[in-house]
Image: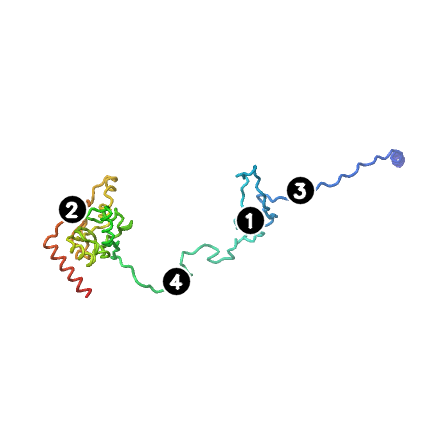
Amino acid sequence: MWRRASHLLLRTAAAAPTRSLPPARPPLPLAPRVASASSSYATAAVSAPTARAPRTVGTLLRLNDLRDNPGARKQKTRKGRGIGSGKGKTAGRGHKGQKARGTARFGFEGGQTPLRRRLPRRGFKNPFSLTFQPCGLGKIAKLINAGKIDSSELITMKTLKETGAIGKQIKDGIRLMGRGAEEIKWPIHLEVSRATARAKAAVEAAGGTVRLVYYNKLGFRALLKPEWFEKKGRLLPKAARPPPKQRDKVDSIGRLPAPTKPLRFTPEELEFAAKRDAARVSVTA
């Protein structure tokens, strides 16, 4: 029975007309693979950037088309992102050790004597050193001739700074120098921190006076910028007394606010100034 059924199926299949299959279509071209954001930089094929000419509208350049030159911006090295990048796993630190685990403090050399202690010390910094701004008599004479300084009034360090006789920073005071002493032919009265023997002799020969006064840092601020204290709602400070190492180098304490009239020297001050000048001459000789 099953044999007769199989023969019948074979006969019907042979008698049935054969249908032709449609022609096979050509394979589609594969799209180029683009590296995704999640893939590593080493496995992704990065093509060399090509320069693209910026589009223009007539003779104008579009701002939205401005770009850096190819290769001008280098991507940052990402460490610890797989062995294919060359900076994975240990991220360039190697195996174990202090340099692989953390960083040492600045100047630490593993326990040996560091360089800053191996080198010898040279010199020292004097904490009592003072820096004075030099100001020559010739410059003061030019400012008087130009009408910027009134020779009939007292010439203070504030006057010299406001008229441009010295720089912006007054530091520890002004030293009166003897440069241009021959130009002083009228009496002037000055109050400065220090003065050379030549400058003092030239001013006194013309009938003027030179008084050496002391101001500390706060005193200089009150002398030069008294409006600062008014702006802060504070009172002007009292003038400070000179320290012991400077008492024999000044004539008196500076006055606040800035004085306009000179003070006459008392007999004690004149005697003290004479002794100081005599001691200076003996030291230089």
Q: How crowded is mark 1: few (under 14 residues within 10 Å), some or many (20 or more)?
A: few
Label 4: element kind: helix
Residue with the mark numbered 3: 31
193 relative to 270 in the view: left or right: right
Kindly identify the residue that appears in the image at 13 percent across and 59 percent down: 274
Q: Which mark is residue 188?
A: none
Q: On the rendered image, what quadrant is the C terminus found in?
A: bottom left
Q: Residue 115 carries which label?
A: 4
Q: Pointers 4 and 3 in contact (CB under 8 A)?
A: no
- The one nearer the camera, 78 or 218, is 218
Q: For marks 4 and 3, give the CA distance.
A: 62 Å
Identify which amino acid the numbered label 2 is placed on. Lys
Which is closer to the viewer, label 4 or label 3?
Answer: 3
> Please, is residue 17 above or below residue 33 in the view?
above
Q: For marks 1 and 2, give the CA distance.
A: 73 Å
Residue 270, horizontal then vertical, whole percent? 12, 55
Which is closer to the viewer, label 2 or label 3?
Answer: 2
Marked residue nearer the N-terminal end (1 or 3): 3
Label 2: element kind: loop
Identify which amino acid the numbered label 3 is placed on. Ala
Identify which amino acid the numbered label 1 is placed on. Gly
Q: Pointers 2 and 3 in contact (CB under 8 A)?
A: no
Residue with the mark numbered 1: 71
Q: For marks 4 and 1, give the CA distance.
A: 41 Å
Identify which amino acid the numbered label 4 is placed on. Leu
